[in-house]
Amino acid sequence: MYIHWNDTVNLLSKLTLRRLWNAGKVWSSYQLSKWLRKPIQWGLPVSISFEPTTSCNLRCPECPSGLREFSRPTGMLQQDFFAKPSTILPPICCTSFSIFKVSRTSIRSF
């Protein structure tokens, strides 16, 4: 089994005691939910993803944007949404922050 050392070091550099405690709460609530067969949620999300646009023309069959199945209007997020992610998310919340469906034009605008 090959270990991606760069990714491992990157993840370990982001871990704090508060984030480990949060991850433990999320994991234990998942295990308890499986055992009791009822939903229990403790902790905050460990990973967060954003899609800055719903206007994609690729029509991928597994994507809600490609299938045009969004309940919200087609468009882009405002530029000031990503101005200060630390004000949006609590510090114990996540160890990864992903942005999907980013084109060259949207990267230049951020």
Image (cartoon, rainbow, N blue to C red):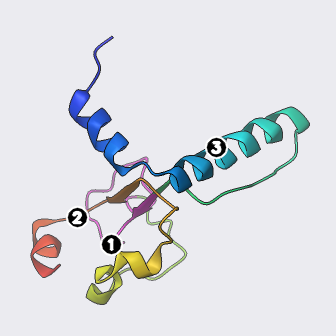
Per the rendering, the mark at residue 110 is none
Q: Residue 61: where, in percent of width, then height?
A: 40, 48
Describe residue 33's horizontal placement relative to residue 48 as left or right.
right
Lower sequence index among marks 2 and 1: 1
Badge 2 element: loop
Q: In which image quadrant can residue 80 be found? A: bottom left
The span picked out in magenta is 48-66
Tag 2 residue:
102
Q: Secondary structure at mark 1?
A: loop
Front residue of this view, candidates 38 and 41: 41
Quadrant for the C terminus, please. bottom left
Residue lying at the far front in this picture: please name it. 17
Q: Which amino acid, by three-letter code, is at mark 3?
A: Gly
Q: Using the rendered view, name the quadrant where residue 106 is placed.
A: bottom left
Q: Is residue 90 left or right of residue 6?
A: right
Secondary structure mainly formed by the magenta segment: loop
Residue 64, percent across and down? Answer: 46, 59
Q: Secondary structure at mark 3?
A: helix
> At label 2, which amino acid type do we have?
Val
Q: Residue at x 75, y 35 (%)?
A: 31
Quadrant hosting residue 74: bottom left
Residue 46 image offset from top left, x and y in percent: 52, 53
Q: CA distance from mark 1 to mark 3?
A: 30 Å
Please state the horizontal and vertical placement of residue 2, each as a whole percent of the image. 28, 15
Q: Which residue is label 3 attached to?
A: 24
